[in-house]
Amino acid sequence: MSAAVPNTLASAAVVVRRVIAASAEDLFDAWLDPEALAQWMRPGTINSTVARVEPRVGGEYEISMQGQSGPIVHKGVYRVIERPKRLVFTWISGPTENKETLVTVDFVRVDKRTEVIVTHEQLPESAMPSHRNGWTSGLEHLDEACQKGLIG
Amino acid sequence: MGEYKSRELDGIFNALCDPTRRAILARLTDADARVTEIAADFPISLNSISKHIRMLERAGLLRRSIVGRDHVLTLNAAPLADAQAWIEKYRRFWEGRLAALDAFVTSKKRKRK
């Protein structure tokens, strides 16, 4: 297949990984502790973050980031809480067009460190194109995404 | 970044969830092509090809210009560029958050020691 077709659509998820020199437990807990979230769920443009969490399956959370042009509110429901391996929650915010998206966080031990893998999927249609390869490579993976019902 | 209209985006994704339509787009990345040339490349009727092309057109993924008696098709990647920008933004968001998580948890650990 020729290059430069919107392979963009190859993946229906954003996947971001980072290996951190900490235990899976410490890292996992930082996702469910409002005080911890207030510290690290604060992008550069945000003055302060207020988090409220109900850390049980079916429980809700709300993370409100105070930006200069008003608060940006992210909220959702916990779907899976498997300490210290996996956390799955829905994620709804302005940037997702107030549609429900899904965030899965996996914690994988790597020697004494832990790899944290964030998979953000069921993004609004606008977000489904892969972020990774721009307009390169083919559309092969699209079938998979279509079959999974992630697209279309 | 542009405003996304769900209905348009549904059109884009529906248009792309078909191997023939993806093959048509792939064909057009090399060069513009006439409808008849595209039709010759696929073992299906001109009528079927025309339907596929119309879907891609409606999704804004290709443009048709009429030159004399020829209908020339051009790939239009613009609808997908906005989408690209959106996803790039979220990738940066999570990368930033994981860096902050790293700093937060590792500094906390140092304090405990």
Image (cartoon, rainbow, N blue to C red):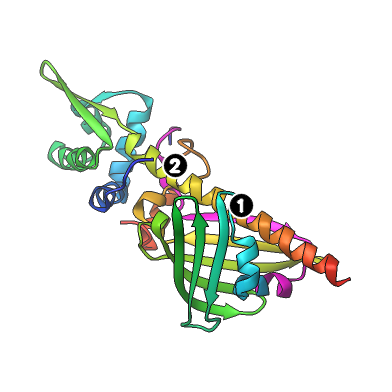
State the image quarter where residue B38 is shown: top left
In the rendered image, which residue does mark 1 sit on?
B95
- Give the percent coordinates (x, y) of residue A98: 36, 61
Identified by mark 2, the residue type is Ala
Between B50 and A31, the one nearer to me in the picture = A31
What element does badge 2 sit on?
A: helix
Does residue A12 appear in this view?
A: no
Question: Is A27 within the magenta?
Answer: yes
Q: Is residue A54 above or below residue A35?
A: below
In the picture, measured across the screen, residue B15 lies left or right of residue A142, that is left
Tell me which residue sits at (24%, 49%) in the image: B11
Q: Position of residue A123 (x, y in %)?
A: 41, 58
In front here: B18 or B93?
B93
The C terminus of chain A lies in quadrant: bottom left
Q: Which mark is residue A69?
A: none
Residue placed at 89% from the left, 71% from the top? B113
What's the residue type where badge 1 is placed?
Glu
Residue at point 63% right, 75% down?
A33
Quarter-of-image position of residue A118: bottom right
- The image shows residue A8, relative to residue A99, as above or below, that is above
Q: Is residue B74 left or right of residue A75?
A: left
- Which chain hosts label 2? B
- Which of B24 and B14 lies nearest the eye of the viewer? B14
Chain assignment, label 1: B
- Residue range highlighted in magenta: A2-28
- Extreme right residue here? B113
* Residue with the mark numbered 2: B85
Estimate the x, y position of residue A138 in percent, counting from the top left.
44, 40
